[in-house]
Amino acid sequence: MKRLQARLRGVALVALGVMVAAGGARAQTPNPCFEPDNGTGTVTLPPAGCDYLSPDQFHMIADGLPPGTTIIMAPIHRNFICEQSTGGPCNSPGGPLGGEVENFNSTGVFRLSGTGVLSGWSRIVNVPLGVQIATGPRANGAPVQSFQTDMQRIQGSITGDPDFDLFEVVGGTANGFPSPGSTTLTRQPDGSYAVSSKFNVGYSIRFVGAAGGKLAGYAGTTTGTVTMATGNSGTQATATTNTTKK
């Protein structure tokens, strides 16, 4: 265990050093999010036209790779589309927080870059995701509406990729990875709302390298927590990396 902890501290320092040398993990830049009033004095969530970013954080794969080698992943969560596969509405009242439950599909965009023996390798992987979010009650019509949220489920995978026989993402409270969050809606002069929202998402990423690809012969599972945010919350995340070998 001590050797594992020492290795993980080492690869974290290597990854951080590489990112600092490249100009930092990601500059803190505004990530504005505005949504129209849906006719009930609030907005429909998730905010379809906004991205959830991790401006100061990154996922990192360490397990299954040679010592001193990591895959750094800068994630973006976007393209929220109503899930109609069950024939029901995307937003249903109730749920564990007493507000509503949102079911939708989305895309996880992972910008990958390697360190160690993978130094110089970089690419983008798009993973289709199924997502469920629970929200707390809100005061429709109020100029400021703040309420709890929870990422219940977020999961998806790709197969048959040139580098990955499998790249699988699983997260959310219902999957055993606590993922609490919060959202604030602030009415604007034009009647729209500024959306400030963030989640501390617990996750597991499992990969199997594809024969003939850059990751051939490698496989592993990494767990951790990362803050995903949109709106004003997008500039307030605190940099942390939490990586555990499974």
Image (spheres, rainbow, N blue to C red):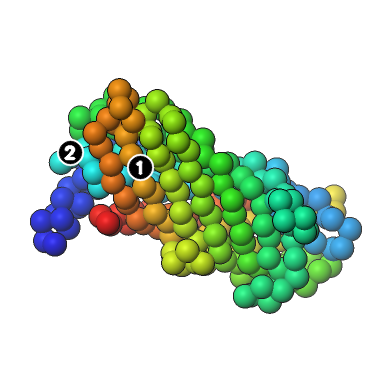
Q: Residue at x 77, y 59 (%)?
A: 88
- Name the outermost residue toward the left: 3
Q: Disc 2 residue type?
A: Pro
Q: Residue at x 30, y 23 (%)?
A: 212
Using residue 135 as the reference point, say whether residue 36 is left or right of it: right
Per the image, the residue denoted by label 1 is 207
Q: Residue at x 48, y 38 (%)?
A: 158
Tell us which disc is closer to us: 2 or 1: 1
| 102 relative to 109, above or below | below
In the rendered view of the protein, which quadrant contains the N terminus? bottom left
Q: Position of residue 242 (x, y in %)?
A: 32, 56
In the rendered view of the protein, which quadrant contains the C terminus? bottom left
**Secondary element type, mark 2:** loop
Using residue 231 as the reference point, say whether residue 11 is left or right of it: left
Which label was assigned to residue 10? none
Per the image, the residue denoted by label 2 is 66
Q: Disc 1 residue type?
A: Phe
Residue 95 figure quarter? bottom right
Total labels drawn? 2
Regarding residue 158, the answer to whether it shows in the image is: yes
Viewer-closest of 225 and 171: 171
State the separation of the CA atoms marked 2 and 1. Answer: 14 Å
Labels 2 and 1 touching (C-beta < 8 A): no
Using residue 124 as the reference point, say whether residue 35 is left or right of it: right
| 184 relative to 230, above or below | below
Crowd around label 2: few <14 · some 14–19 · many ≥20 (10 Å): few
